[in-house]
Protein backbone atom coordinates (compact mmCIF):
# COMPACT_ATOMS: atom_id res chain seq x y z
CA UNK A 1 0.00 0.00 0.00
CA UNK A 2 1.02 3.62 -0.31
CA UNK A 3 3.05 5.17 2.46
CA UNK A 4 3.89 8.64 3.70
CA UNK A 5 1.51 11.38 4.66
CA UNK A 6 -1.75 11.47 2.75
CA UNK A 7 -2.60 14.95 4.02
CA UNK A 8 -3.42 17.31 1.21
CA UNK A 9 -0.54 19.77 0.83
CA UNK A 10 -0.09 22.98 -1.09
CA UNK A 11 -2.27 23.60 -4.16
CA UNK A 12 -0.78 21.48 -6.92
CA UNK A 13 -0.68 24.40 -9.33
CA UNK A 14 2.04 25.95 -7.16
CA UNK A 15 4.12 22.80 -7.52
CA UNK A 16 3.59 22.73 -11.27
CA UNK A 17 4.91 26.29 -11.48
CA UNK A 18 7.93 25.26 -9.39
CA UNK A 19 8.59 22.24 -11.62
CA UNK A 20 8.26 24.37 -14.74
CA UNK A 21 10.69 26.94 -13.36
CA UNK A 22 13.21 24.20 -12.53
CA UNK A 23 12.91 22.82 -16.05
CA UNK A 24 13.36 26.32 -17.48
CA UNK A 25 16.56 26.81 -15.48
CA UNK A 26 17.88 23.43 -16.63
CA UNK A 27 17.20 24.43 -20.22
CA UNK A 28 18.72 27.89 -20.18
CA UNK A 29 21.98 27.27 -18.36
CA UNK A 30 23.11 30.79 -19.22
CA UNK A 31 21.82 34.31 -19.75
CA UNK A 32 22.81 34.40 -23.40
CA UNK A 33 19.83 35.35 -25.56
CA UNK A 34 19.11 32.77 -28.25
CA UNK A 35 15.93 32.12 -30.20
CA UNK A 36 14.32 28.87 -29.12
CA UNK A 37 13.16 26.62 -31.93
CA UNK A 38 11.80 23.60 -30.15
CA UNK A 39 9.96 20.39 -30.74
CA UNK A 40 8.41 17.73 -28.52
CA UNK A 41 10.42 14.48 -28.45
CA UNK A 42 7.63 12.63 -26.69
CA UNK A 43 6.19 9.13 -26.52
CA UNK A 44 9.51 7.62 -25.49
CA UNK A 45 9.64 7.47 -21.70
CA UNK A 46 5.93 8.16 -21.22
CA UNK A 47 4.23 6.09 -23.90
CA UNK A 48 0.78 7.41 -24.75
CA UNK A 49 -1.67 5.12 -26.50
CA UNK A 50 -2.90 7.67 -29.00
CA UNK A 51 0.64 8.49 -30.19
CA UNK A 52 1.92 5.01 -30.99
CA UNK A 53 0.54 4.41 -34.50
CA UNK A 54 2.97 3.91 -37.33
CA UNK A 55 6.07 3.04 -35.29
CA UNK A 56 8.04 -0.25 -35.41
CA UNK A 57 6.20 -3.33 -34.18
CA UNK A 58 8.75 -5.44 -32.28
CA UNK A 59 6.18 -7.61 -30.54
CA UNK A 60 4.13 -8.86 -33.45
CA UNK A 61 1.23 -7.30 -35.30
CA UNK A 62 -1.34 -5.77 -32.95
CA UNK A 63 -4.98 -6.64 -33.13
CA UNK A 64 -7.22 -4.10 -34.84
CA UNK A 65 -7.28 -0.83 -32.93
CA UNK A 66 -4.36 -1.75 -30.67
CA UNK A 67 -1.25 0.42 -30.71
CA UNK A 68 1.99 -1.50 -31.39
CA UNK A 69 3.68 -0.87 -28.04
CA UNK A 70 0.71 -2.42 -26.28
CA UNK A 71 0.34 -5.45 -28.56
CA UNK A 72 -0.39 -8.64 -26.64
CA UNK A 73 -1.37 -6.82 -23.44
CA UNK A 74 -4.69 -6.45 -21.66
CA UNK A 75 -5.99 -2.95 -21.08
CA UNK A 76 -7.45 -2.57 -17.61
CA UNK A 77 -9.64 0.35 -18.70
CA UNK A 78 -11.29 1.38 -21.98
CA UNK A 79 -7.89 2.65 -23.22
CA UNK A 80 -4.29 1.64 -22.65
CA UNK A 81 -1.77 3.27 -20.33
CA UNK A 82 1.83 2.40 -19.47
CA UNK A 83 0.61 0.75 -16.27
CA UNK A 84 -0.86 -2.00 -18.46
CA UNK A 85 2.67 -3.11 -19.33
CA UNK A 86 3.40 -6.39 -17.53
CA UNK A 87 5.38 -9.53 -18.26
CA UNK A 88 3.84 -11.79 -20.90
CA UNK A 89 4.87 -15.27 -22.09
CA UNK A 90 6.60 -13.73 -25.10
CA UNK A 91 8.34 -10.70 -23.61
CA UNK A 92 9.06 -9.21 -20.20
CA UNK A 93 7.83 -5.73 -19.30
CA UNK A 94 11.42 -4.52 -19.06
CA UNK A 95 12.42 -5.94 -22.45
CA UNK A 96 9.33 -4.41 -24.03
CA UNK A 97 10.28 -1.01 -22.64
CA UNK A 98 13.97 -1.18 -23.48
CA UNK A 99 13.23 -2.38 -27.01
CA UNK A 100 10.85 0.52 -27.44
CA UNK A 101 13.49 3.02 -26.36
CA UNK A 102 16.08 1.42 -28.61
CA UNK A 103 13.72 1.76 -31.57
CA UNK A 104 12.46 5.26 -30.90
CA UNK A 105 15.62 7.16 -29.88
CA UNK A 106 17.78 7.52 -32.97
CA UNK A 107 20.75 9.65 -34.02
CA UNK A 108 19.06 10.33 -37.34
CA UNK A 109 16.16 12.05 -35.57
CA UNK A 110 18.49 14.67 -34.14
CA UNK A 111 20.36 15.07 -37.40
CA UNK A 112 17.09 15.76 -39.21
CA UNK A 113 15.89 18.12 -36.49
CA UNK A 114 19.12 20.11 -36.69
CA UNK A 115 18.68 20.40 -40.44
CA UNK A 116 15.21 21.82 -39.79
CA UNK A 117 16.58 24.49 -37.44
CA UNK A 118 15.54 22.90 -34.14
CA UNK A 119 17.81 23.78 -31.22
CA UNK A 120 15.74 22.57 -28.25
CA UNK A 121 13.85 19.36 -27.64
CA UNK A 122 11.29 18.83 -24.91
CA UNK A 123 11.65 15.36 -23.41
CA UNK A 124 8.63 14.19 -21.37
CA UNK A 125 9.41 11.69 -18.63
CA UNK A 126 7.74 10.16 -15.60
CA UNK A 127 8.61 10.16 -11.92
CA UNK A 128 9.32 6.39 -12.14
CA UNK A 129 12.21 7.18 -14.50
CA UNK A 130 13.97 8.99 -11.64
CA UNK A 131 12.82 7.74 -8.23
CA UNK A 132 11.83 4.42 -6.71
CA UNK A 133 9.64 3.51 -3.74
CA UNK A 134 10.57 1.51 -0.63
CA UNK A 135 9.31 -2.05 -0.35
CA UNK A 136 5.93 -2.58 -1.93
CA UNK A 137 4.82 1.03 -1.47
CA UNK A 138 3.36 3.29 -4.11
CA UNK A 139 2.30 6.91 -4.45
CA UNK A 140 -0.69 7.94 -2.33
CA UNK A 141 -3.89 6.75 -3.97
CA UNK A 142 -6.85 4.59 -2.97
CA UNK A 143 -6.48 0.89 -3.64
CA UNK A 144 -9.57 1.04 -5.82
CA UNK A 145 -11.23 3.95 -7.55
CA UNK A 146 -14.84 4.94 -7.08
CA UNK A 147 -15.81 2.56 -9.85
CA UNK A 148 -13.65 -0.27 -8.51
CA UNK A 149 -10.69 0.39 -10.82
CA UNK A 150 -7.47 -1.16 -9.35
CA UNK A 151 -5.39 2.01 -8.99
CA UNK A 152 -2.68 0.80 -6.59
CA UNK A 153 -2.04 -2.34 -8.67
CA UNK A 154 -1.63 -0.16 -11.74
CA UNK A 155 0.86 2.01 -9.89
CA UNK A 156 2.85 -1.09 -8.95
CA UNK A 157 2.83 -2.26 -12.56
CA UNK A 158 4.27 1.07 -13.64
CA UNK A 159 7.08 0.94 -11.10
CA UNK A 160 7.96 -2.66 -11.93
CA UNK A 161 8.56 -2.09 -15.64
CA UNK A 162 12.15 -1.00 -15.04
CA UNK A 163 14.29 0.81 -12.49
CA UNK A 164 15.64 4.36 -12.76
CA UNK A 165 19.07 2.82 -13.42
CA UNK A 166 17.61 0.91 -16.39
CA UNK A 167 16.32 4.10 -17.95
CA UNK A 168 19.47 6.13 -17.38
CA UNK A 169 21.45 4.95 -20.47
CA UNK A 170 18.58 6.11 -22.65
CA UNK A 171 18.60 9.57 -21.13
CA UNK A 172 22.37 9.54 -21.72
CA UNK A 173 21.71 8.68 -25.33
CA UNK A 174 19.28 11.57 -25.81
CA UNK A 175 21.73 14.05 -24.29
CA UNK A 176 24.60 12.63 -26.34
CA UNK A 177 22.69 13.02 -29.60
CA UNK A 178 21.46 16.48 -28.62
CA UNK A 179 25.01 17.62 -27.81
CA UNK A 180 26.26 16.15 -31.08
CA UNK A 181 23.85 18.30 -33.05
CA UNK A 182 24.04 21.45 -30.94
CA UNK A 183 20.70 21.10 -29.16
CA UNK A 184 19.54 21.63 -25.61
CA UNK A 185 17.17 19.31 -23.77
CA UNK A 186 14.19 20.45 -21.71
CA UNK A 187 13.50 17.63 -19.26
CA UNK A 188 9.76 17.70 -18.65
CA UNK A 189 8.33 15.93 -15.60
CA UNK A 190 5.27 14.96 -17.58
CA UNK A 191 3.84 12.41 -15.15
CA UNK A 192 3.72 12.93 -11.38
CA UNK A 193 3.00 10.52 -8.50
CA UNK A 194 -0.67 9.75 -8.01
CA UNK A 195 -1.56 11.18 -11.44
CA UNK A 196 -2.17 14.84 -12.17
CA UNK A 197 -5.09 14.21 -14.51
CA UNK A 198 -6.24 10.58 -14.17
CA UNK A 199 -5.18 9.86 -17.73
CA UNK A 200 -2.49 8.09 -19.77
CA UNK A 201 -0.27 11.18 -19.82
CA UNK A 202 0.53 10.35 -16.17
CA UNK A 203 1.44 6.71 -16.87
CA UNK A 204 -1.81 5.38 -15.42
CA UNK A 205 -5.53 5.96 -15.77
CA UNK A 206 -7.67 6.08 -12.62
CA UNK A 207 -11.07 4.93 -13.84
CA UNK A 208 -12.50 2.44 -16.31
CA UNK A 209 -14.06 5.20 -18.42
CA UNK A 210 -12.13 8.23 -19.68
CA UNK A 211 -14.81 10.72 -18.71
CA UNK A 212 -14.85 9.40 -15.13
CA UNK A 213 -11.05 9.64 -14.80
CA UNK A 214 -11.19 13.31 -15.74
CA UNK A 215 -13.75 14.12 -13.06
CA UNK A 216 -12.60 15.94 -9.93
CA UNK A 217 -11.57 13.57 -7.16
CA UNK A 218 -9.95 11.00 -9.45
CA UNK A 219 -6.49 12.60 -9.48
CA UNK A 220 -4.26 12.01 -6.46
CA UNK A 221 -1.15 14.17 -6.81
CA UNK A 222 -2.13 16.68 -4.10
CA UNK A 223 -0.69 14.96 -1.01
CA UNK A 224 2.53 15.72 0.86
CA UNK A 225 4.01 12.30 0.01
CA UNK A 226 3.27 12.54 -3.70
CA UNK A 227 4.57 16.10 -3.91
CA UNK A 228 7.70 15.14 -1.98
CA UNK A 229 8.46 12.33 -4.42
CA UNK A 230 7.85 14.70 -7.35
CA UNK A 231 10.40 17.11 -5.91
CA UNK A 232 12.84 14.21 -5.46
CA UNK A 233 12.34 13.36 -9.13
CA UNK A 234 13.08 16.96 -10.14
CA UNK A 235 16.19 16.92 -7.96
CA UNK A 236 17.41 13.80 -9.78
CA UNK A 237 16.63 15.46 -13.10
CA UNK A 238 18.64 18.52 -12.05
CA UNK A 239 21.61 16.37 -11.03
CA UNK A 240 21.47 14.57 -14.35
CA UNK A 241 20.98 17.63 -16.52
Image (spheres, rainbow, N blue to C red):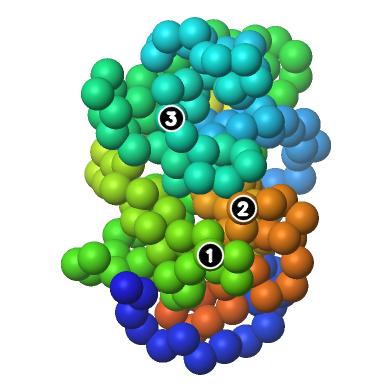
Position of residue 139 measured from the top left corner of the image (x, y, whole percent):
42, 69
Front residue of 3/176: it is: 3
What kind of element bears circle 2? loop
What kind of element bears circle 3? loop
Earlier residue among tags 2 and 3: 3
> Is residue 180 shown to the viewer in this render?
no
Query: Residue at 46% of width from left, 86% of height from top?
Result: 6
Query: Residue at 46% of width from left, 34% of height from top?
Result: 74
Earlier residue among tags 2 and 1: 1
- The image's mark for residue 73 is 3
Q: Quadrant of the N terminus?
A: bottom left
- The image's mark for residue 210 is none
Front residue of 213/26: it is: 213
Position of residue 24 measured from the top left corner of the image (x, y, whole percent):
65, 55
Instruction: Measure the alpha-carbon separation of dots 3 and 1.
Output: 20 Å
- The image's mark for residue 148 is 1
Q: Residues within 10 Å of mark 3 (few under 14, many from 20)?
A: some
Front residue of 235/158: it is: 158
Query: Residue at 57% of width from left, 38% of height from top?
Result: 80
Amino acid sequence: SSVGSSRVGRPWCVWVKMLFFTSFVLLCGSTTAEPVRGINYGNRFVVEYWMTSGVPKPFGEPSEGTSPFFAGLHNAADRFAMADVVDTPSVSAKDRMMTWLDQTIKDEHFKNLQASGVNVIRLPCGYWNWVSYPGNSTPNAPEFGKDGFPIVQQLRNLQRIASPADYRPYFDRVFEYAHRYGMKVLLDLHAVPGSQNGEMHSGIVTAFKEDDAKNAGNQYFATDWNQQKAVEAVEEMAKFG
